[in-house]
């Protein structure tokens, strides 16, 4: 078996919030708390009711396998200067977002420090409205197993009231309905360190659905 070369990231200055031009292996960045850039894309559907599209992380992922997570999310490889979210979106769910519809929510400064990981990341967060059916998505890099359409109201409710909800999903072969509850979602979405992120996200979704434009930003 041929080993794949380790992903290289660009080091960012944690205090200044700017790239340094230096490359760093992903594993070292995550061990030593060396800041780097990530990209997030949240897809919102307006019909039949407001929904968020979640990806189901592949079962072989080394971190949080099988959990429902941000529609698209990943690190920015070293040397990639343009079309960062486009690259990640195509690899994970088979779409290339229309620049005219991408809503840039700015950067969120994220930090996770525990016994096995010291992760610092500047996360560029985007919102995207698309009423394409779930069958329009495909999974090109073996990192995503399925996409789920979760009502926005339910996403908000499970922060304080956990109960099951029947939702629609697509696994690349067929549409299906299944039940989800809070323990199916990536646990860090509910972490105190993400409270500002999630507050901004839900406010941005409300603004987009009500006014067609978004004024709130991550910072």
Image (cartoon, helix red, strand yellow):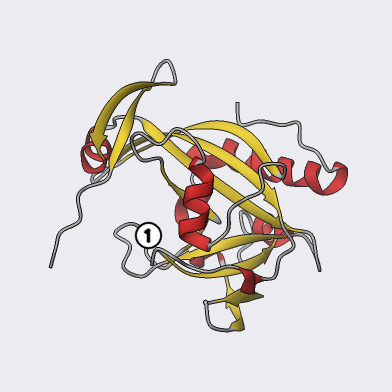
Horizontal and vertical percent for residue 7?
27, 45
**Mark 1 Cα shell of 10 Å, populated few (<14), some (14-19), many (≥20):** some
Write down the quadrant of residue 11 in the picture: top left
Q: Residue at x 46, y 55 (%)?
A: 187
Residue 164 shows in the view: no
* Residue in the picture at 73% in, 46% down: 205
For image coordinates 19% across by 50% down, the residue present is: 5
Quadrant of the snapshot with the N terminus: bottom left
Name the residue nearer the viewer: 201 or 17: 17
Position of 19 relative to 118 (above/below) = above
Residue that mark 1 sits on: 64
Q: Secondary structure at mark 1?
A: loop
Which residue is the extreme one toward the left?
A: 1
Residue 58 pos. (x, y %):
39, 68
Q: Nearer the viewer, residue 96 or 7?
A: 96
Residue at image position (58%, 53%) is 96
Is residue 204 shown above or below 3? above
From what the image shows, is residue 22 above or below residue 51? Answer: above
Q: Is residue 26 above or below residue 94?
A: above
Farthest residue to the right: give it: 211
Is the C terminus in the top left, top right, bottom left or bottom right quadrant? top right
Tell whether 106 sits left or right of 215.
left
The answer to whether residue 96 shows anywhere in this view is yes
- Residue 77 position by quadrant: top left
From the top left corner, tell me how far across and down residue 127 is, in percent.
66, 45
């Amino acid at each position: 078996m041929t080993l794949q070369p380790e992903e290289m990231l660009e080091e960012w200055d944690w205090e200044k919030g700017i790239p340094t031009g230096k490359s760093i292996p992903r594993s070292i960045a995550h061990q030593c708390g060396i800041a780097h850039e990530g990209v997030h894309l949240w897809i919102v559907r307006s019909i039949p009711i407001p929904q968020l599209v979640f990806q189901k992380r592949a079962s072989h992922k080394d971190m949080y396998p099988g959990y429902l997570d941000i529609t698209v999310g990943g690190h920015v490889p070293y040397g990639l200067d343009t079309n960062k979210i486009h690259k990640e979106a195509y690899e994970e769910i088979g779409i290339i977002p229309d620049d005219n519809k991408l809503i840039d929510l700015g950067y969120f400064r994220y930090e996770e420090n525990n016994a096995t990981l010291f992760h610092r990341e500047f996360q560029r967060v985007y919102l995207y409205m698309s009423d394409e059916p779930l069958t329009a998505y495909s999974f090109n890099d073996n990192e995503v197993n399925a996409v789920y359409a979760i009502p926005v109201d339910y996403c908000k409710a499970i922060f304080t009231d956990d109960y099951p909800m029947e939702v629609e999903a697509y696994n690349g072969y067929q549409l299906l309905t299944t039940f989800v509850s809070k323990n199916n979602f990536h646990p860090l979405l509910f972490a105190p360190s993400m409270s500002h992120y999630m507050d901004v996200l839900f406010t941005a979704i409300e603004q987009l659905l009500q006014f067609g434009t978004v004024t709130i930003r991550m910072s």
